[in-house]
Image (cartoon, grey):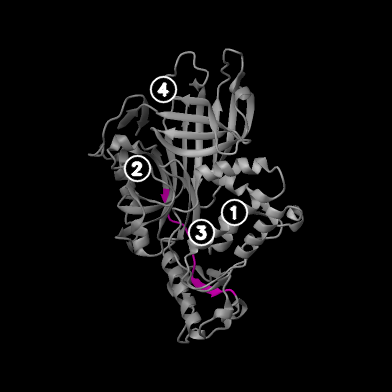
Amino acid sequence: MEYHKRKPEIIIEIKRVNFEADSYTDKIVARFMSSKVKEGSELESNAFTSYSFTESIANISGNFSLSLTLEKDSKGYTWLDKLDVMDLVFIYEFRELRFIGYIENIRYVGKITGGKPTRKILVTGGNMGKLLSSFKLIMNKFICMFNAPAIVASNLLKGTLALQVDKGSKISSILIKVYEDFINYTLQMGEGNNLGKGIYQILNRYIDYKSRLSDDVLWYPINIAPYNMGENNIWDMWRNLMVAPINEMFGRTNKRGVFELIFRQAPFEPDDWDSKPLNILPSIIVTDHDLGRSIEQIYTYYLSLLQGGPYPSQTIMLLDHEQDFDIVEIDKEKWKLYGYKPMIVTHKYYDRNKLDTYNDDVRLMRNLTLMLKRWYEHNDEFLSGTVNIMTVNPNEWKGKLQNPRIGERIGLIDGEFYVESSVHSWNFKGPMTTRLEISRGYCYVRGVMMMPIEEFGNKLVLFTSRPKDANYIPGEEAEEIER
């Protein structure tokens, strides 16, 4: 039996933004702490009994929840009276900011269980990505037809959204241009758009939309049209410019205290995979796990198409697959097991007016198809599932172990895994835990996929029963994990 005991270290700050101010200003309205608070303080409190927050590469909109007691201040007010929707929420774990969000709902929850009443205040909301996706624009000329600045901004946005961009151009430059023109137009719409300006102040302060955009370039010339009639938001417009699953686009809170927007090619190539941060998980912090193999996402037929390119999609199955430039890849061995399982990706906005030569375009489709196959052909060999760990305190590990984040790697049972999502949580008298959803478990050498993780069942048994890791550094007693 192995134990790891330590003290939870949590701070949750609630700030209120002045939406009427010309520039960003805020004030702290609450600070919930796991440590002792100042006697008589109206702001500091130990009244929270649980929290959780989520991040995922599949969805920009993460959520949080916070449970509070019915504690009253000197005037008889509870936190239900003192907190408000649109207040900002900052969650610190071990003195490191790990979540920024805003309040959407505050509720009083009461129920009777086993004859005993339980009452609490439940606060829920979203992250900065959710706030960004709620910042909407109506593509309707009548909204701004009597507003001269809005008309100018509208024309600039329309120009951006009708760009013809040559092959080799940086995708990041296009995304930044769309973002900035969208914001400018939204702020100019109508008169007295104070709420819009207030939200923009928050986005401008807490969202980094430039630093984490990759230097990837366009493989082919495009003619952009990334908006829809009706409601639009920045995130949807950006997503319209990406090609899933070739590209990844997600957001996460970084150590600088801002929510960074990330756009990049999925780590198909060994160098890309190997460049992602890797945290080797020691056995002592793993509390439970659920790992295995699956055939839920198996592909045997791969094809990348250029929208409006040399081949219409309806003629693909009629192609002579023995031609010199075969653009289809078939996994003959897996076809015997699973049959026809297509992975067909259409690359949008292809500008066929700038088509170089027929053979060049076919060669490009062929290369894109091969890249797809390299990424997905081992899906039935990968390990995937969930791992629950004690929330990482980097100071406890002298920098050898960091908080695993989405879009990064973890090392486990002699393999490497990709972190798809994370859920951080804590309940009163319980441990701080992080639930990681992981995929692509395999043996890699400098990013190259070598072989499946062999005897992984036996390795898991040995992993969870081995003595304390030699690098383990004891923490303070209070929080307990038992194996």
Q: Residues within 10 Å of mark 2 (few under 14, many from 20)?
A: some
State whether residue 461 appears in this view. Answer: yes
Name the residue rendered at 72%, 45% in the picture: 191
Alpha-carbon distance for marks 3 and 2? 31 Å
Judged by depth in the image, the label closer to the viewer, 3 or 1, is 1
| Residue range of the region highlighted in magenta in the rendering | 291-307
The amino acid on which the numbered mark 2 sits, given as a three-letter code, is Gln
The amino acid on which the numbered mark 1 sits, given as a three-letter code, is Ile
Magenta segment includes 409: no
Magenta segment includes 296: yes
Alpha-carbon distance for marks 3 and 4? 46 Å
Alpha-carbon distance for marks 1 and 2? 31 Å
Identify the residue under disc 2: 402
Tag of residue 296: 3
Q: Residues within 10 Å of mark 4 (few under 14, many from 20)?
A: few
Name the residue rendered at 59%, 44% in the picture: 200
State whether residue 316 appears in this view. Answer: no
Identify the residue under disc 1: 234
In the displayed structure image, the side of residue 344 where residue 395 appears, left or right: left
Q: Tell me where residue 267 sits by quadrant.
A: bottom left
Q: Are marks 4 and 1 in contact (CB under 8 Å)?
A: no
For label 3, the SS is loop
Identify the residue under disc 4: 35
Q: Nearer the viewer, residue 207 or 436?
A: 207
